[in-house]
Image: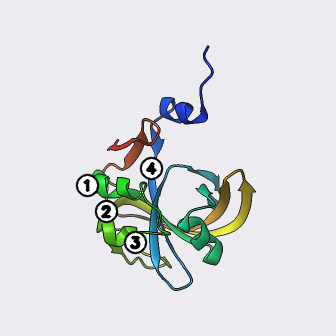
Amino acid sequence: MEKITVEESTRLSSPHLFALAVTKNKEERLNIMGLSWFTFVSFNPGQILLSISRKSCTNANIKSDGIITLCMPIEEIKEQAFKCCTSSGNSVDKLKETGIELVEIEGFEIPAVKKSSVAWSLRVNNTIETGAQSIFIADIVSAVSLNDKKHLMAFDGYERLDAV
């Protein structure tokens, strides 16, 4: 047995589901963020839990209006999706920089990533502050299947993305 760091444990426990969260600020400016710290917590009602750094633009946007579109990107946009993990929406317009295409979906308040296998429209109903993260528990308002291509997973402690 060997003691390891939390960071090392994420590398050893990979792969992890990978998603892109699309949010907006008070001025309606959209932001996109790559994340893996999310999971289903209830089927009735449908709910998803997300853990997001308090320093992030996404965190501030969620606290502003409580709405998120969570998308499972496909392999075709792997490089673009990875770029969403390497900069902050506080200083970079990641949608403009990556060229990720969004699509309006009926019943969604925020557009979804067009090249996704699945997308959820979420509305936060509870927030818990922990460590450097905020945990958002969100109701699933709507869910859509955009295509049947394989979605991306994060490998090696979030060092790379690949389809499964």
Separation of residues labelled 3 and 2 (CA atoms) = 19 Å
The tag on residue 18 is: 4
| Amino acid at circle 2 | Lys
The answer to which of marks 4 and 2 sits earlier in the sequence is: 4
Separation of residues labelled 4 and 3 (CA atoms) = 20 Å
Which residue appears at 32% of the width and 54% of the height? Answer: 74
Q: Are marks 4 and 2 in contact (CB under 8 Å)?
A: no
The furthest residue to the bottom: 27
| Amino acid at circle 1 | Glu
Q: Quadrant of the N terminus?
A: top right
Q: Are marks 2 and 1 in contact (CB under 8 Å)?
A: yes
The answer to which of marks 3 and 2 sits earlier in the sequence is: 3
- Does residue 72 sit above or below 125 in this rendering? above
Q: How crowded is the residue under tag 2: few (<14 C-alpha within 10 Å), some, or many (20+)? A: many
| Amino acid at circle 4 | Phe
Which residue appears at 40% of the width and 44% of the height? Answer: 153
Which residue appears at 74% of the width and 59% of the height? Answer: 128
SS for callout 4 = loop
Q: How crowded is the residue under tag 4: few (<14 C-alpha within 10 Å), some, or many (20+)? A: many
Could you say where residue 52 lies in the image, as x and y percent from the top left? 59, 57
Could you say where residue 18 lies in the image, as x and y percent from the top left? 45, 50
Q: How crowded is the residue under tag 3: few (<14 C-alpha within 10 Å), some, or many (20+)? A: some
- In the picture of the structure, the residue carrying the numbered disc 1 is 76
Q: Quadrant of the C terminus?
A: top left
As rendered, which of 31 and 163 lies closer to the eye?
Answer: 31
